[in-house]
């Protein structure tokens, strides 16, 4: 997908969110036209309506799991295609007005997912503080900075401190090291080309809720040695106990194995919704793609040498 300085990218705002931080980590996206939007559903629906060309939203955290509002909007409400995933290392800081001390803090604001990742810090260091919810980590920081709210702190990103003239009262307040969040870049149409190190995401709806139905789905992947990287069950909103499954698998829909697996699932299950095939993120992603290209070229040269012996 071609991205230029005039490409409109909608993302979870206001400015200073981890979503913006992840966006700025991509040179092509950093150079695009940015549109902070107040909620994840609004950012996704802005894409569908054409108000923006691309949407950029969080989908999964390594500590708290799936961002359900993103997952459910993609699963049930809209039809868009994943173009890319980006993984960002997350550090939460406790931000307050300049000169504040930890003893002064009586209220902590943040996004629910962020609050959940800092439970231990809040319990041990701020046991008497009131915890309140904001629309995003950056919104919490913005409210404190613009309102000059003394005694109120935000669990937010280092980026938000500079934007809203706050200072860290405490740094790295997350409960677990190695905390990461995965973000998705989405477009209205168009599947990203295969790179040799890809993921494919789908939603599989069961034909019937009966014993062995999930096993039947999983066996299609096992039979083809396709590695499942994520499996989430979500209620279909059709009735209690009626679930669908959101799956991320290794490989691209262009692959014969992945394509054959999806064909079989479409034929045997209630339905399959294709969410996208896209380059997989990760520190070793570029190397994996280079290795894949080299392996493909070697295998292609071998096949060509075999075919040269076909008698004419």
Image (cartoon, rainbow, N blue to C red):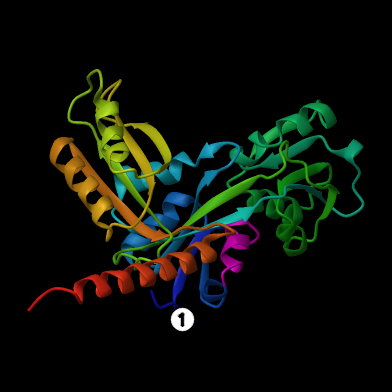
Tell me the quarter of the picture where residue 235 sits.
top left
On whether residue 24 falls in the magenta region, the answer is yes
Residue 136 % position (x, y): 60, 48
Q: Is residue 187 magenta?
A: no
Which sits in the foreground, 56 or 217?
A: 217
Q: Tally the numbered discs.
A: 1
Residue linked to disc 1: 4
Query: How far across and down, in percent of the image, does residue 8 sit?
Result: 45, 72
Q: Is residue 52 above or below residue 155?
A: below
Residue 36 visible? The answer is: no
In the picture provided, is 91 more to the left or to the right than 221?
right
- Residue 250 appears in the figure: yes
Quadrant of the frame with the C terminus: bottom left
Report the residue that reaches farthest toward the bottom: 5
Q: Label 1's element?
A: loop
The correct choice, above or below, for 209 with respect to 144 in the image is above
Above/below status of 33 relative to 211? below
Instruction: Read off the magenta span.
Output: 14-26
Q: Residue at x 46, y 81 (%)?
A: 4
Who's the residue at 77% across and 27% down the image? 123
**Quarter holding the N terminus?**
bottom left
Tell me if mark 1 has few (under 14), some (14-19) or many (20+) residues whose alpha carbon lies within 10 angstroms of its own.
few
Q: Write the residue at 24% across / 56% down.
A: 256
- x and y, in percent, of residue 259 in the image: 23, 53
Question: Is residue 41 toward the left or the right of residue 120 in the image?
Answer: left
Q: Position of residue 127 (x, y in %)?
A: 81, 26
Query: Would residue 108 be found to the left or right of residue 113 on screen?
Result: right
Q: Residue at x 69, y 51 (%)?
A: 143
Residue 22 is left or right of residue 41, and the answer is: right
């Amino acid at each position: 997908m071609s991205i230029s300085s005039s490409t409109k990218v909608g993302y979870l705002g206001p400015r200073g969110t981890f979503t913006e931080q992840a966006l700025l980590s991509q040179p092509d996206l950093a150079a695009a036209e940015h549109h902070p939007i107040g909620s994840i559903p609004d950012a996704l629906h802005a894409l569908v309506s054409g108000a923006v060309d691309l949407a950029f939203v969080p989908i999964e955290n390594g500590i708290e799991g799936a961002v359900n509002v993103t997952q459910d909007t993609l699963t049930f409400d809209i039809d868009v295609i994943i173009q890319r995933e980006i993984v960002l290392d997350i550090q939460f800081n406790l931000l307050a007005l300049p000169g504040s001390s930890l003893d002064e803090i009586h209220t902590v604001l943040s996004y629910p997912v962020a609050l959940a990742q800092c439970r231990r810090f809040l319990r041990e260091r701020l046991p008497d503080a009131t915890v309140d919810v904001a629309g995003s980590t950056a919104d919490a920081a913005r409210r404190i900075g613009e309102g000059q709210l003394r005694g109120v702190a935000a669990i937010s990103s280092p980026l938000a401190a500079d934007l809203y003239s706050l200072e860290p009262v405490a740094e790295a307040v997350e409960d677990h090291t190695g905390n990461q969040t995965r973000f998705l870049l989405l477009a209205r149409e168009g599947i990203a080309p295969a790179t040799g190190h890809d993921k494919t995401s789908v939603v599989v709806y069961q034909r019937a809720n009966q014993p062995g139905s999930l096993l039947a789905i999983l066996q299609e992947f096992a039979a083809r040695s396709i590695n499942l990287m994520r499996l989430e069950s979500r209620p279909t909103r059709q009735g209690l106990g009626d679930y669908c499954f959101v799956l991320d698998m290794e490989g691209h829909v262009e692959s014969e194995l992945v394509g054959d697996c999806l064909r079989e699932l479409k034929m045997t299950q209630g339905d399959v919704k294709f969410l996208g095939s896209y380059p997989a993120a990760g520190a070793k992603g570029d190397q994996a793609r280079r290795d894949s290209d080299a392996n493909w070229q070697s295998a292609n040269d071998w096949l060509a040498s075999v075919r040269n012996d076909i008698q004419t």
